[in-house]
Image (spheres, rainbow, N blue to C red):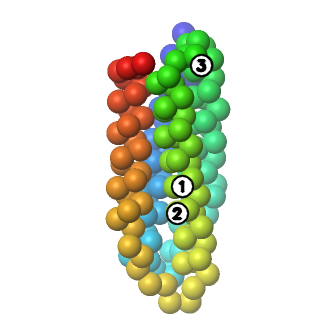
Amino acid sequence: MLYLLVKSAHILAIIIWISGMVGVALFLAYPSASIAKLIAQWDRKVTSPAMMLAWVLGLALAYMGGWFGDGWLWAKLVAVFLLSGLHGALSGKLRRVGASEAPEGQNVTPFLVGLFGFVVVIVVLVVTKPF
């Protein structure tokens, strides 16, 4: 039962994290000085803690499942690490745009492609556990 509760919390944290990243990317594409501070607060107070919670709960699940010797987990961890770096890059862009008086739209296509690509890889690895 504990495993299922941890897994449920992990999935919820991931949904909040990824949703926040998509929200930041869309804001950066069409920035508005009037809501820049609100988006930055949401990223700092909700999205970033959700990412940290997803990491903690995910590592707890890996420990509970005894998967640290499995190759698929290490491949997933690399993808999650890169996804975390992508979140950091988006947060940095958000800070710079938020500091601007008249923010300009950013090309966020590479961020969104990377985000969804990493999510697809992670989901496939977790569901199939291929190696």
User: Element at badge 1?
Assistant: helix
Residues at marks 1 and 3, CA–CA distance in whole angstroms: 25 Å
Side of 111 where 94 appears, left or right: right
User: Element at badge 2?
Assistant: helix
Looking at the rendered structure, the kind of residue marked 2 is Leu
Residues at marks 3 and 2, CA–CA distance in whole angstroms: 30 Å
Q: Quadrant of residue 62?
A: top right
Of discs 3 and 2, which sits in the foreground? 3
The relative height of residue 48 versus residue 120 in the rendered view (above or below) is below
- In the image, 37 versus 7, the foreground residue is 7
User: Residue at left 54%, top 55%?
Assistant: 87
Tell me whether circle 2 and circle 1 mark residues in contact (CB < 8 Å).
Answer: yes
Residue labelled with disc 2: 90
Side of 120 where 6 appears, left or right: right
Q: x, y percentage for residue 17?
A: 51, 47
First reached walking from the N terminus: tag 1 or tag 3? 3
Of discs 1 and 3, which sits in the foreground? 3
Q: Residues within 10 Å of mark 2 (few under 14, many from 20)?
A: many
Q: Quadrant of residue 5?
A: top right
Q: Residues within 10 Å of mark 1 (few under 14, many from 20)?
A: many
- In the image, 85 versus 12, the foreground residue is 85
Q: x, y percentage for residue 79?
A: 49, 40
Q: Which mark is residue 87?
A: 1
Q: How many discs appear?
A: 3
**Looking at this rendering, what residue extends furthest in the top direction?**
1
Q: x, y percentage for residue 119?
A: 40, 41
Tell me whether circle 1 and circle 3 mark residues in contact (CB < 8 Å).
Answer: no
Residues at marks 2 and 1, CA–CA distance in whole angstroms: 5 Å
Residue labelled with disc 3: 68
The relative height of residue 77 versus residue 105 in the rendered view (above or below) is above
